[in-house]
Image (cartoon, rainbow, N blue to C red):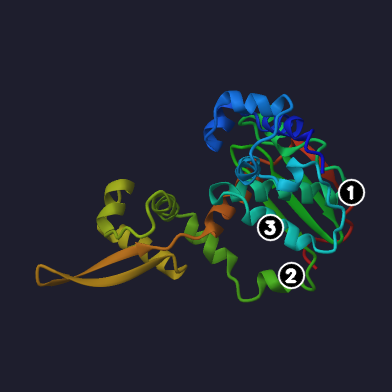
Amino acid sequence: MNIKSMGTIIANLRKEKGVTQEELAKYTLVSTQAVSKWENGGVPDTELLPKIADFFGVSIDTLFDRNITDYSDIETTVAKKIVETNPDNRFNVAFDLCWVIQRAIGGENNPQKGTLTEIQNELGNTQRYSSIFTDTGFTRIGLSKRLPYFFLSPESEDKNLALFENIDYIAFFKDFSDKAVFDAMVLLNKREADKAFTPNLLMKNLNIEFEKAMNVIKTLEKYNVITATQIEMDDINQEIYKFSPTPAFIAFLIFTHEMIDTPRSFSWYIGGRNKPYLT
């Protein structure tokens, strides 16, 4: 462990993340002068080390410049890194690891080279992708802060059977080609999931008639994203509805977007797949 280099490590992490000394000081509840002192050869108090590590999404070992090269329990190491991260930042840390995984699949073993933070700072809101497709599986990752995602698909025994058995894609696409159905899904995904609604919500926001609103509700009930409940109000039984959002719809939008607007800008692209995707 190298205590003397800790200040340099903290300074480098701060610059990589694009944060100021003031922001780090505020998070750790110390003065900006204290952070400056660390970066110029000082050492933080021991009780601050977990908080500093959480702020940067790294392990305490990283602050000590302690490299762990034993990969026999890599799953535990990764899980520990994520669990020890502030819950509000866990997805960001996990996504950083996804970028490391993506490049490792492609043969890159230096995670500090071309970090995700560097790429995102360069891109801004411009989307860029990375993809690997071989006969053993394929990946796709969206790198920008605007719409980050990671998809990995190892080769299955019979992807053709898995994808098409008892699934009527044509009926689904027909249902969602109805503008009112599609608009209703977008509208409901913008609301709190536990908020009940009546057909009036769809009528008002989508500018449709009652009969059309009920048809939309029945269509969405078919895909188990809407459930009906009977309540008694003013001595009259009324039906209200609740929406159960699914991340599958957002994933559907992401990849439909890619079908319409084909990705052309890649940071890491490895081909070499010879067999069909559906086997």
Tell me if residue 9 can be seen: yes
Image coordinates of residue 194 in percent, x first then y, are: 35, 60
Query: Which SS class for mark 3?
Result: helix
Q: Position of residue 86 (x, y in %)?
A: 57, 49
Compared with residue 191, is residue 14 higher up or lower down, i.e. above or below? Answer: above
Question: Which residue in the protein does label 3 denote?
Answer: 80
Q: Is residue 134 left or right of residue 32?
A: right
Relative height, residue 164 to residue 62 (above, below): below
Marks 1 and 3, how far apart in space?
25 Å
Dot 1 lies on which element? Answer: loop
Given this view, does label 1 or label 2 mark the residue nearer the observer?
A: 1
| Vertical comparison of 21 with 266: above or below | above
* Residue that lies at the very extreme toward the bottom in this rendered image: 166
Q: Earlier in the sequence, mark 1 or mark 2?
A: 1
Residue that numbered label 2 is attached to: 160
Type of residue at label 3?
Lys
Of the pair 13 and 226, the residue shown nearer to us: 13
For the point 70% across and 29% down, the residue is 42
Query: Which mark, residue 221?
Result: none
Of badges 2 and 3, the one in the foreground is 3
Which residue has dot 1 on it?
A: 107
Q: Tell me the amino acid under the disc marked 1.
A: Gly
Where on the picture, by quarter, is residue 134?
A: bottom right
Sequence-wise first label, 2 or 3: 3
